[in-house]
Image (spheres, coloured by chain):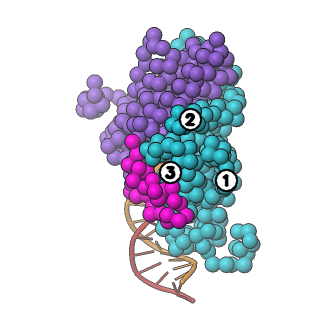
Chain colours: A cyan, B purple, C orange, D red
Amino acid sequence: MTDAAAHRRREPLSRARVLQAALHLVDTEGPEALSMRRLASALEVATMTIYHHVPGRAELLDGLSEVMVQEIGMRFGEAPDAALRRLAHGIRAVALAHPAAFRLVGMRPLRTTDALAPVDAGLGALRAMGFDDETVVQGYRVLVSFARGFALGEISSFTLEGDAPAAAPPAVDPVRFPHIAELGPVLAEPDRDAAFALGVDLVVGGLVARARTLR
Amino acid sequence: MTDAAAHRRREPLSRARVLQAALHLVDTEGPEALSMRRLASALEVATMTIYHHVPGRAELLDGLSEVMVQEIGMRFGEAPDAALRRLAHGIRAVALAHPAAFRLVGMRPLRTTDALAPVDAGLGALRAMGFDDETVVQGYRVLVSFARGFALGEISSFTLEGDAPAAAPPAVDPVRFPHIAELGPVLAEPDRDAAFALGVDLVVGGLVARARTLR
DNA sequence: ACCTGAACACCGTTCAAGT
DNA sequence: ACCTGAACACCGTTCAAGT
């Protein structure tokens, strides 16, 4: 049932409906639209009613990342390196599907157990490659740091800010910064898909190569 | 001259002194302390006085990243791969020196020309390795995305949030998430330096290997 | 059980005015 | 040139109360 339908029937509010409405609000009106007051008014409910389903704004944001992480599809019986590549691409896909929301929560630690399935899958893939525990955790952090960092960076370059309009790159002195000046056109319109694929190849490809030296 | 000394003599306010005070405020009182009002009161000046030196809050944040980026040391005549490694470690070092401020601005695009020296150096190193323009820009984005993403992630795991106290990882169902459960101790206290070094090795090492195939 | 209104202690920014 | 006070339109959250 859609949120709108649930609402028309005046079903009792729930954490799930609050989170759903929050994500919709951010998707349609931008990150700065997510205030407890505006969320309540979108749900046609008093501001304080929200607090009966979510303890406060911090947990609302945690819930938002939970909902988004659950959109990362899982799959079973995949080769470990394919699973890692899918995890990275899944993180970026969620970010591109919800850029404003990802900007809001993209670097928060996952604090809610319902958001841990992709984490477990990623760690499992690295263990299946034969790494010791330390290297599993390190490799996981490297891959996820890259994927989140890349996605946040590209989002910032094309979403409006919540406080300032999308940035035009500053004009640059070709004497001080010759490389920036000469690369200008490519810097302005990079092939973002190719850049992300390069990063995934470097990280996952490198890990696969190291795994081979273990056996 | 220190900010405090300048202030005692009632020197006129300047953009530089505003930014310096803003960074100090965030360093000492956390990210949520950076409001125009609290910054003004730290400078013992009326709130609106700030606006004569900085157009608004967005530009204040841009200025903060400018100041932080300038702390990344530059060096000349270095081998390209060493320059890339130093850039990555420099980004992380700045983040660890100013965790609260980095959380505030770590993913903003650099919008101020005085912040572009490390960008130009990084691009120059990749060009010196022989890559075509597209690959230079892609490789740069990959390295910087990883460094920023990693630093932001580790900061979030040990800084208080501005809205919630430092996160204790949630207890986890070992049936649903066996890998998380079994890796628990390592996940709780990862070797962050080693993890970052692994990422730098994978990215820079991988780029060096690709550069070799070009000649 | 579920929801609400009023109040408190904050925000960023505009504007017209002061020295 | 440089600084300011008052006002406007917002915030998140506490508390006591309503159904």
| Magenta-drawn segment | B162-191
Q: Quadrant of the C terminus of chain B?
A: top right
Q: Is residue A134 magenta?
A: no
Q: Where is mark 1, residue-wise?
A: A77
Label 1 and label 2: CA atoms lie apart by 20 Å
Q: Which mark is residue A212?
A: 2
Q: Residue furthest front?
A: A215
Local crowd at mark 3 within 10 Å, few (<14), some, or many (≥20)? some
**Disc 3 or 2, which lies upstream in sequence?**
3
Q: Which mark is residue A108?
A: 3
Please state the horizontal and vertical placement of residue B6, each as a whole percent of the image. 28, 28
Label 3 and label 2: CA atoms lie apart by 33 Å
Q: Amino acid at mark 1?
A: Gly
Please state the horizontal and vertical placement of residue A63, each as a whole percent of the image. 56, 61
A160 over A114 or under it: above or below? above
Chain label for disc 3: A
**Closer to the camera: disc 1 or disc 3?**
1
Q: Quadrant of the N terminus of chain B?
A: top left
Residue depicted at 53% across the width and 65% down the height: B175
Label 1 and label 3: CA atoms lie apart by 29 Å
Local crowd at mark 1 within 10 Å, few (<14), some, or many (≥20)? few
Res A215 seen here: yes
Along the line of sight, which residue is nearer the eye, A169 or A59?
A59
Residue depicted at 39% across the width and 53% down the height: B185
Residue depicted at 53% across the width and 13% down the height: A176
**Closer to the camera: disc 3 or disc 2?**
2
Please state the horizontal and vertical placement of residue A90, each as a whole percent of the image. 65, 48
Chain label for disc 2: A
Along the line of sight, which residue is nearer the eye, B156 or B98?
B156
Dots 1, 3 in contact, CB < 8 A:
no
Q: Quadrant of residue D19?
A: bottom right
